[in-house]
Every structure is written in C-alpha cells, then in structure tokens.
Image (spheres, rainbow, N blue to C red):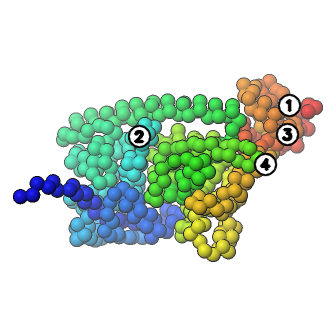
C-alpha cells in the first residue's frame, strides 16, 4: 500500500458567461465587441473562466431586466448548457435590474456587473492598509443599496469567485427577516462612516507629505494611463525601482513614488498611479480620492499609452476624460507612446505620433527613447514658462515667494485682501497656483485700472 500523500489540486475556476449590451443613447469610447474583449481580460484577471458571450443592441435598457425578455430566456438556456455559475453584465446594473435577473435565471447562477468584477480585482490586488481601506469603502457603498433578504445569494456573491471578501465591508450578512436586513444596513452605514474617517487621516497624511515635497522644490510627475499601459515597467527602468510588474489589468493598485535623475543634474519625483479603465466605477473614483489627489497635485502628467493596443487612441481619450473629471485637466502633460519594441515598421510609429499631443515614442522594456523622454520632461519642468494671472491671498506667502524667485513678474498690485500678480512661471508650478487663477478677466483692462508698481 502506498503511503504517498496526494498532491493538492488547484481549485477549478468558476465558469462565467458574459453579456454585452450596446445602448444607443449611451455611447462609449470602445465598441461593444472591444468592451467585451476587455471584460474577458477582467474576468480572467479575477480568476474566472469565460465560456461564452451574448450581445444585444437596445435603444435603452429594459425597465426590469436590463436586457430584453427574449434575451433573458436565451441567456438562461446558454448559461445552463455551458454549465456557467456566473453571468457578468458589461455595465453597472441598478439594484432592481440585478434582482430581476437573479429571479429570471434562478438560484444556481450568480449575477455580477462590471463594477462588482472590478471591485473584486481591486480587493485581490490591494496590499497596503490604505489600498484595502479604499477598496472596502467602495465595496460597502456598492453593496449597501443591493442588500436583500436573499442572504444565501449575497453570501455567495461576497465570498465566491468574484468578490472573495467573505462578507461585505467586514460585516457577516446572515439571518432572514426584515429586522436583520435593517441591522445589517445600519452596520454597513457605520462601517462606511468609520472607513471615511480613516481615509481622511490618510488624505491628511498625503497632504502633509505633498507640502513637504513642495517646500523641497522637487517637481512631481504623475504617471497616468490605461491599465496595463506599462507605467510600472517604465518607473522600474527610470528609477531602478522594484515596483511589481505583471501582464494583467490593475497589477499596480497602490501609488509608488521614486526619485528620477533628469538631464543637467536636475531631479523629479515620479509617482506610479492606479491604471484607469473605461466605465471606471464611480464608487472607486470616490473611494480613491486620496490617491487620485496625487495626480491632481502633480506638476506634470506623463500619460502612458500602449501604442501596440488596437484601441490605443480610444484608451487615451478615456483617460483624458477621467483626468478632467478629477480636476487635473489644467496640468501640463506629455504623452509617452509605449511598447514600440513590438513594432517593426518605424514609419507606423512616426505616423502614430501625429495623433497625440506632445508625444514621444518609447519602450519601457528595452529603454528606447527614454533619454529623449527625460530631456522633454526636463524642458517642461525647468525651461518652459507659462503666462499666469492670479489673485493670491497674503496667507499664500510661499506662492508669492515662488512667483518672485522662480518666475518673471510683469505686473503686481497689492490690495486689501491679497496681491494681484501677472507674468510667467515655470509650468511645473501651475498646479499650485490654479486655485487662484483669474478666470475670464481681461488682463489689459486690469493693468490700466490698477496702479502698476515698478518691478
């Protein structure tokens, strides 16, 4: 008789069926087929096995089940034939849509939407206490309006293949009845309040850290881009860092800052931020506000674009929209077209440069074009001056000093509450002055009506 202990086997992946819906009144940056291809990558990143997909085009979502009744029946048959345990809808479902789909498909099939899937991936990849706090907050805010008395369903959704937290927001959800439902709602609301207080402490700590960096006058460069664009690979090469790199979506979740040497003996701090994606859940944007402020407070944005991706331009536009939404659209930006090592046709690369603002072709993997990129960053941070018109309160003495020391002052007028200044400053300081910019003011009329001092 053999005494050998059998080797443990890997757990079988849950089988998932994908559903894509094209809503005419809700256009996106990607086509339905491209969005489904992305959803496939998301599912695989979450540890699921995609076994099929179903599509439908609608003028607007069905009032009860999001997809039409006929498609619901077709989906039920396909999911049962393929032995699917999970159905993922390529959009964010309302609580009602999710409940009605669950009733229609039966208790053996779980319904997830794109938001729940992304939340699960974030939960798997969060390593630091800050990242875990932010992910848990997003999960709580997402699941709160979706609580029902179907406790067995919710436990599976929170602890199964997509959503492996074992509970929602650290609160065990069990026990039937209306009373238990209200208790759990109250517990989750309390947890949300606690998480927000903890994240506010993180936010205050980051603000103090940013203030310290500003006093040191070391400019910051926020690396932004679509998920899997190669930001971490580039940071590792530029800073000789050891940021985790993987060929998967959202491999990097927590921001990492490293010092990088620029031409002429100058330096800059590069921050690798979380990757963006089409239909980025609003709950994640809100929960990650403390992290996203690293982008909004940067002196320069370096947007990474995977130029080898067939939807590179659409991904670029999606990131641009998110940058505008978080209030960072005014910050100077350089576009790095990454992964040119995958191209043999150099003419195709040069042609691609024409489609992007202030773009340069690079390879973070083999280092091609990085010296030119660093020279361009140096010029943007230390040599390029931007015209500016600001009204600064006297309590912003540090900014007034920066204007005098680092910029060119063409006009200055001291008033009762502060000082009105016009001139030019290095582009890297624009983000710090942005709250006090004089919007919509005619500069020539100001100069003629105020007494100009001799500079």
Q: CA distance from mark 1 to mark 4?
A: 25 Å
Local secondary structure at mark 1: strand
Q: Residue at x 82, y 26 (%)?
A: 415
**Is residue 423 left or right of 220 when viewed as pictured?**
right
In this view, the residue in front, 126 or 186, is 126
Local secondary structure at mark 4: loop
Residue designated by label 2: 132
In this view, the residue in front, 450 or 290, is 290
Decide which of tag 2 and tag 3 comes sooner along the chain. Answer: 2
Decide which of tag 3 and tag 1 comes sooner along the chain. Answer: 3
In this view, the residue in front, 167 or 41, is 41
Decide which of tag 1 and tag 2 comes sooner along the chain. Answer: 2
Q: Where residue 69 appears, x then y in whole percent?
A: 30, 67
- Label 2: few (<14), some (14–19) or many (≥20) C-alpha neighbours in 10 Å: some
Q: CA distance from mark 1 to mark 2?
A: 49 Å
Q: Is residue 85 visible?
A: yes
Residue designated by label 4: 384
Q: Is residue 118 above or below residue 451?
A: below
Residue designated by label 1: 413
């Amino acid at each position: 008789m053999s005494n050998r202990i059998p080797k443990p086997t890997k757990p079988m992946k849950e089988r998932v069926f994908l559903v894509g819906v094209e809503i005419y009144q809700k256009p996106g940056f990607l086509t339905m087929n491209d969005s489904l291809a992305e959803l496939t990558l998301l599912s695989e990143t979450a540890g699921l096995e995609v076994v099929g997909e179903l599509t439908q085009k609608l003028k607007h979502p069905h009032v009860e089940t999001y997809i039409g009744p006929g498609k619901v029946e077709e989906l039920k048959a396909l999911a049962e034939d393929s032995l699917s345990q999970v159905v993922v809808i390529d959009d964010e479902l309302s609580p009602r849509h999710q409940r009605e789909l669950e009733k229609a498909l039966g208790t053996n099939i779980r319904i997830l939407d794109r938001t729940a899937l992304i939340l699960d991936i974030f939960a798997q990849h969060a390593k630091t206490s800050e990242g875990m706090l932010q992910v848990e907050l997003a999960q709580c805010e997402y699941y709160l309006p979706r609580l029902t008395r179907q406790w067995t369903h919710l436990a599976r959704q929170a602890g199964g293949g997509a959503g492996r937290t074992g509970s929602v927001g650290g609160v065990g959800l069990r026990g039937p009845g209306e009373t238990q439902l209200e208790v759990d709602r109250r517990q989750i609301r309390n947890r949300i309040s606690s998480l927000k207080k903890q994240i506010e402490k993180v936010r205050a700590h980051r603000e103090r850290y940013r203030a310290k960096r500003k006093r040191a006058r070391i400019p910051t460069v926020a690396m932004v881009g679509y998920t899997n664009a190669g930001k971490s690979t580039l940071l590792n090469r530029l800073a000789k860092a050891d940021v985790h790199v993987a060929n998967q979506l959202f491999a990097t979740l927590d921001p990492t800052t490293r010092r990088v040497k620029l031409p002429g003996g100058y330096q800059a701090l590069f921050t690798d931020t979380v990757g963006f994606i089409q239909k980025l859940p609003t709950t994640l944007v809100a929960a990650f506000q403390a992290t996203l402020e690293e982008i909004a407070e940067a002196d320069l944005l370096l947007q990474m674009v995977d130029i080898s991706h067939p939807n590179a331009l659409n991904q670029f536009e999606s990131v641009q929209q998110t940058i505008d939404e978080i209030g960072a659209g005014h910050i100077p930006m350089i576009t790095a077209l990454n992964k040119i090592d995958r191209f043999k046709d150099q003419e195709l690369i040069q042609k691609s440069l024409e489609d992007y603002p202030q773009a340069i072709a690079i390879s973070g993997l083999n280092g091609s074009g990085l010296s030119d990129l660093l020279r361009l960053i140096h010029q943007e941070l230390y040599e390029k001056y931007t015209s500016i018109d600001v009204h600064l309160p006297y309590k912003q003495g540090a900014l007034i000093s920066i204007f005098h020391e680092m910029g060119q002052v063409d006009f200055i007028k001291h008033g009762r509450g502060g000082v009105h200044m016009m001139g030019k400053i290095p582009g890297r300081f624009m983000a710090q002055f942005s709250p006090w910019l004089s919007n919509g003011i005619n500069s020539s009329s100001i100069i003629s009506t105020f007494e100009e001092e001799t500079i």
